[in-house]
Amino acid sequence: MKVAVIGGGIMGSGIAQLAAMAGHAVAIRDVGEAELGRARDAIESSLAKLCEKDRLSEAEADAARESLTFTTALDEAVGAADVVVEAVPELLEVKHQVLAEVVAAAPAGALLGTNTSQLSITSIGAALGDDASRLVGMHFFNPPVLMRLCELVRGLATADDALERAREFATGLGKTVVVCQKDSPGFITSRAYAILRLECLRMLEEGVATAEDIDTAMKLGFNFPMGPLELGDFNGLDTYLHAIESLERAHGDRFRPTVGLRNMVAAGHLGRKTGRGFYDYSEG
Ligand code: NAI
């Protein structure tokens, strides 16, 4: 199949690599050469690591490299695509604009996937008119090459046939698929995890335990690779606050951010990127 990935950032580069490793011809479109260079470097580094760990042969890595093209030209990327996956920033206006351009340039039968992590698929599709029937939420996880899940989300206008094509595509990439049958912000995963993380934050603020002990309890007690607080620091507490506020708008008070989290963001303690969050990174 011909696959186009729009946006070659953290997720787009990983999804493109995954599709290339599954034998598809993949075009990545981003806005400039610098962004495409970063996507190429990220893919190269991931392929090298997979080879080092014997999870991929050199021949398979070469085949994946040869299946990938990098372009700033949207027509070139999507002109003959069977599947287009959008992985641009999590802003509704940007997604509307990008998908409208994709619909104008891609074949009329192309499947449209959006990798949004929590926006409503129905509201993303609202800009597409009848073509919203081809739009499916395809929520891959970071890093897409290693994480086993793809959460599919049905928007109000999503056709059954589109959902089945998305299931086939994601299964062909080696993912286990779950389907969020009702378009509900946060879907299954982001909604459930947000509550867990909020409860960890409340325990920290109530002095029930230290950040280290809360994270250790979650890691060793539930086999999470990272504790919820350290993951918050890793992704950025401003991003976390923004996500939780949007779930609060959708689902009400149970997602209300804590005062402590708001204070940390107001003080610029955003996690690793500012050197301080739940943990102190000033020593590197
Ligand atoms: P990112 O910021 O790393 O990448 C976004 C890319 O889109 C950038 O390279 C940017 O230059 C490019 N872009 C912006 N406008 C564009 C346009 N008009 N055409 C083509 N490319 C354009 O963002 P990231 O983290 O990869 O997120 C992408 C999507 O995936 C978001 O919707 C996010 O919510 C979702 N997501 C992110 C996860 C994560 O852990 N980072 C996990 C699961 C989903």
Image: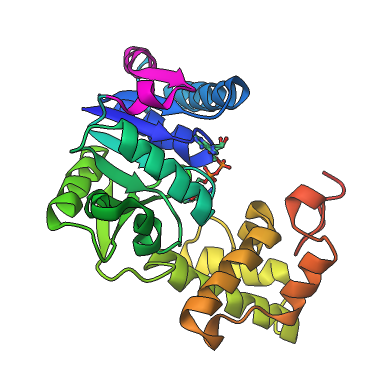
Q: Nearer the viewer, residue 261 or 47?
A: 261
Which image quadrant is residue 106 in? top left
| Image x and y of residue 113, in percent | 32, 46
Residue at the spot x=75%, y=48% of the render? 273
Q: Nearer the viewer, residue 212 or 61?
A: 61
Residue at the spot x=17%, y=44% of the render? 168
Residue at the spot x=25%, y=24% of the render? 80
Q: Is residue 100 left or right of residue 82?
A: right
Residue 249, placed above or below residue 11: below
Residue 203, placed above or below residue 263: below
Q: Is residue 74 magenta?
A: yes
| Image x and y of residue 97, in percent | 46, 45
Q: Nearer the viewer, residue 211 or 145?
A: 145
Residue 145 seen in the current view: no
Q: Which residues are drawn in magenta?
A: 59-79
**Which part of the image, by quadrant, shows the N terminus?**
top left
Q: Nearer the viewer, residue 29 or 97?
A: 97
Which image quadrant is residue 123 in? bottom left
Q: Is residue 150 left or right of residue 260?
A: left
Residue 196 seen in the current view: yes
| Image x and y of residue 41, in percent | 56, 22
**Which part of the image, by quadrant, shows the C terminus?**
top right
Residue 239, placed above or below residue 95: below
Residue 229, placed above or below residue 16: below
